[in-house]
Each structure stands twice: as structure tokens, then as C-alpha cells.
Image (cartoon, helix red, strand yellow):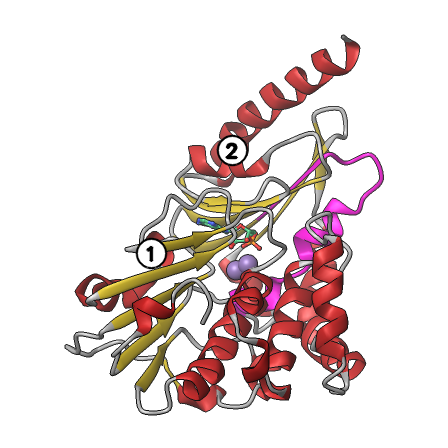
Amino acid sequence: MKRISSELKGAKTIAISGHVRPDGDCVCSVMALYHYLKKELPEAKIDIYLEEPPAPLQILEGIEEIKSTFNTDEIYDVFFAMDCNDDRLGDALPIFRRARRRINIDHHISNTGCGDVNIVEPERSSTSELLYDLMEPALVDAEIAKAVYIGIAHDTGVFRYSNTSPHTMQIAAELLKFGFDFSKLIEETFYEKTYFQTQIMGRAILGSVRFMDDRCIVSMVSRRMMEFYCVGPKDLDGIVNLLQGVKGVECAIFMYEIGTLEYKVSMRSNGLVNVAQVAVKFGGGGHVRAAGCTMNGTYHDNINNLSKEIAEQLERAQTKEQE
Ligand code: AMP
Ligand code: MN
Ligand code: MN
């Protein structure tokens, strides 16, 4: 692997992990790395520690190798933390801490570098894209290509968000040459929703409220609602993006209840607001236009606290516009 081959020399045991509630980029970069390392280091034992991936991603080859229980005393020679900082490794954190060598590969602007080696490039569309450039082209096969492609597609909203660069498209073009059915894969892993997922999405949109002169929009899903529609956190992807698409909206906020007075917050910006900065203030992180955090308190207190930060940024942006 480019840039880190010396780190891997002699490694006999390797662990790969990513963030809690893994998304497409996380799962795909983990799986692509797994398949790649199996080819580069055929003698090494490679274990994957990750929470259960969303159902549509279970089509990836080797996904059954993922260990979703983290009770091990093993001290790995190398640990790869993908698509996150150590604070989002969840139950894999003790394994990470114990490892002899830690490699962190990520594209979050809020990443402070938790590894002994950090390959953190915020201008990258996705960790999958960054990982692809570390791979020796000769070792990339169709299965690796497929995983990288899906990872990039998920984090770019299928090559739509502003994190999509000419280089992203060049990589995508190279990957398509492997001949997998990209259209079907994107449909089935990104767009397709179950009936209940579609229903709760509708419910969340119906309950949305605009504020701050209609420049912000917010919606919340409670635990009771999730129970009623028989859905979990994994089923709520895409709601915040729909809110973001409302004409005139600068910043969209979506929250779902994860515990008593505890909410997972997702934010999206259409350009004026740096939501990573807002999320970092509340212990989270992410990207300039897509970020998240976990907040304690009532729903209304949380909105008030977030609003204060967002309003300040909007005001600043407005002053700049007027200058
Ligand atoms: P989400 O709203 O969960 O889709 O997340 C948007 C982006 O922010 C993704 O790139 C996440 O990886 C990142 N993100 C979400 N929550 C956190 C958090 N608590 N800490 C750091 N990054 C986060
Ligand atoms: Mn991610
Ligand atoms: Mn990512």
C-alpha cells in the first residue's frame, strides 16, 4: 500500500474498524481495505470490528467476516481506523488503544489525527476515494472496485454534493471499467427504501418546521415514532437531505431520540453555514456541509443552542455579502 508500506512490513495481525452507526463510506472503505490487505498480505490474520452494517450493504462480499462483538484481548500489530477519529470507534476503542501501530485514514475536517500514522485529507469526497489512491492499481479487483465505488457514491449523494471533484469522477470512471452493475448497486444500496422507512420519512417531513426567516428547517423523530413505524436509527438516512432540498433553506437540522433527553443530530448546509464548526461546538464533527453530534437536553433546548451558533454564522455571512 502506498505511503504506509513500511508500517505494514512484518504485520501478522491486523484489525480494521470504522465509526459507530457505520454508513456506506465507512462500511465500504473497511471492506475494500479488507479485500486489498488479504491480497497484499496473504499470510496476515485480518479481523474486522464494526457494528452491523445497514441491510442493503450486506450484498458486499465478505461482509459476514465482520465481527460485531468486540470482546477480545488481542493486541494487533496494526489497527486501521477508517472514516473517523478515535472518539467514534465505539466499542472498538480499547482494541485500537492496545494495538502496536495505529493507522487513521479519514476525510473529516474535524479529525485531529488519532493514529501513529494519520492520512487525513478533508478535501476528499470520501474515505473510500482516499483509500483507493493508496492502493497499488495492480492489486485492485472487481470486488474492491465495487466497494470503493459504492463508498464514494454514498458520501457524494451519488456524485451530487460539492465534495465531488474531477478526481472523484476520474476514479469512478476507472472503477466502472471493472464492469459491475453500478446502476443496480446504487439503486439497491442508496435509493431503495422499505415501506416503513418511506413512511417515517413522510412523517418527519410533515412535522418539519422552518425558522430564522425560513432559512433553517428542523424535524425530529422520537423513540415512540420509531417504535410505531418499527424502524431504528439506520432507517432514518436521507431525511435530513430532503429537508436540505427545501427551496430557500440554508441549514437543515434533523434529530432523533437515542435515549432519555439524548438526541443524535444531523446537520446539512447549502453553503453559508459551516455545520462542522457548529457540530464541533457540541462535541461532534463532520464536514463543512454535512456534520453531526449527540446532544443532551430537551428537543427545544437543543434547537435553541444550535440556532444561536447558526444565526451567528448566517449574520456573519450576510455582513460579508453586503460588504
Ligand atoms: P450524519 O448527519 O450522521 O449523516 O453525519 C454527517 C457527517 O458528519 C458524516 O460525515 C459523519 O461521519 C459526521 N458526523 C456525524 N456525527 C458525528 C460525530 N458525533 N462526530 C464526528 N463526526 C460526525
Ligand atoms: Mn461516515
Ligand atoms: Mn465518509
Q: Image point 81% across, 44% down: which residue? A: 246
Magenta segment: does it hold 292? no
Q: Give left or right: position of 204 versus 113.
A: right
Q: Image point 49% across, 29% down: which residue? A: 305
Against 123, residue 97 (above or below) is below
Q: Determine whether the beta carbon of the residue marked 2 sits less than 8 angstroms from the nearest atom of ligand 1.
A: no
Q: Could you say which is closer to the camera, residue 157 or residue 130?
A: 130
Indicate the quadrant containing the C terminus: top left, top right, bottom left or bottom right. top right
Which disc number belongs to residue 272? none
The quarter holding residue 60 reads bottom right
- Residue where numbered disc 2 is placed: 277
Q: Give left or right: position of 133 versus 318.
A: left
Magenta segment: does it hold 250? yes
Which disc number belongs to residue 117? 1
Q: Image point 71% across, 57% down: which residue? A: 167
Residue 66 is situated, as x and y percent measured from the top left of the image, at 40, 83
Query: Magenta residues?
Result: 232-254
